[in-house]
Amino acid sequence: MGGVVVEGPRACGKTSTGLQHVRSSVRLDSLPQAAQLVELDPGSLLAGETPRLVDEWQLAPSLWNLIRHEIDDRQAKGQFILSGSATPADDVRRHSGAGRLARLPMRTMTLSESGRSSNTVSWQALSAPDALIGVRSPLSYRDLAAEAVRGGWPALLESDLADATDFNAAYLDDLCSSDIPTATGVRHDPVRLRRLLASLARTISGEATANALVADVSADVPIDRDTVGRYLDALNTVFAFDPLPAWSVALRSRTRLRTRAKIHLADPALACAALGASPDRLARDPEYFGQVFEAMAIRDLRVYAEAQRARVYHYRDATGLEIDAIVEHPDGTWAAAEVRLGASMISAAERNLRRLRDERIDTDRTGPPTFLAVITGTEYGYTLPSGVHIVPLATLCP
């Protein structure tokens, strides 16, 4: 490819990562005259040693076609890295970039990347036939609550929890007051937007219709379905809203699959911040902590899966069987994981995984799963006689 587009929420580390792989850069968010230069002298923004980073390129969307043409003219690989924390409005004149620019999603840091994981269970180990032995999590129940509130932002690696709490609260304030208006060109009502974020936070790792969100938000302030839809689109534009799609797969029976996505945000810490949940408050509410813990696990699984060019989905059918994470690779191979915060729910999670494999999925067409696992907040990891792995979240690594 002639270039790579790195996309993700603000402050997840796109610019810092890009700068480690380039020989020159231009940062449009620190260049007040960027729009004029694009119009009058676009070549000056693209000139420089390659690879060249064009940071926050969406502030000058017309650069997209210029970069595409530049890639065509140069006939060379690795010319540009574009980074952006928002998706510009659709423009029929803007080429898709197919064949020239590859897209790379970037998320907040996993427990492994932030140094909180023991890194003893790799992705390959889960698919290996060997049983897990000697696996132990370095994080306690309350440690996990603290990491949920902190989040995976690179800026918070060395910060204490008080600073992390302030950071996430300010992040939400900026999201509602400046990030979304800047990205969309439309000033949304920050009060209604905050109420919608709180509603999404209450439903994190679950499903909710637009009507349910309307009813929840309207308990505080009036809002209609169209407004909720526009606000969700706006949150998606700045990569703050990150729903988990449902899996489409061949089944053994006529059981219908549910297709509604699960609600997730860019980082579970934003859900905690939207509801003002401290580590102590989270730890005292195991039911809600379970939802947040699932969001942490999905964040980490998505990162590990995407490094293998795989995608993560969830499964739910008309009989009520739900599986929290399905990992599907481009060649069609798949794996499944349930997420459970406590040990008392492991047996039920194992039964769900076995029902999925043995009763629901047409493995003659899809093949057997490469692994089945229960991701937990417990201390020890091991493999059950059924072959299902029990894996503490803070032991996983790529």
Image (cartoon, helix red, strand yellow):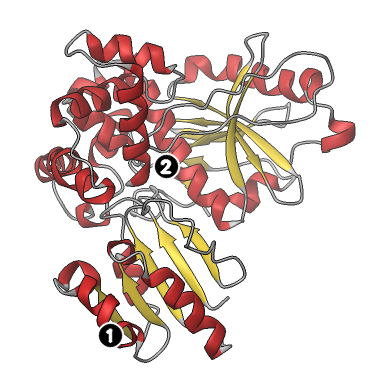
Q: Which mark is residue 41?
A: 1
Q: 210 or 289: nearer the eye? A: 210
**Callout 2 secondary element:** helix
Residue 78 higher or lower than 200, as above or below: below
Percent across and percent down for residue 160 are: 13, 46
Mark earlier in primary sequence (1, 2): 1
Identity of the residue drawn at 32% across and 76% down: 19
Residue 339 higher or lower than 133, as above or below: above
In the picture as drawn, the residue positioned furthest to the right comes out as 364
Percent across and percent down for residue 222 are: 20, 13
State the image quarter where residue 367 is shown.
top right
Foreground mark, 1 or 2, reads: 1
Q: Which residue is mark 2?
A: 394
Q: 20 or 119: nearer the eye? A: 20
Marks 1 and 2 in Cβ contact (< 8 Å): no
State the image quarter where residue 314 is shown.
top right
Identity of the residue drawn at 72% across and 27% down: 385
Amino acid at circle 2: Ala
Name the quarter where the N terminus is drawn. bottom right
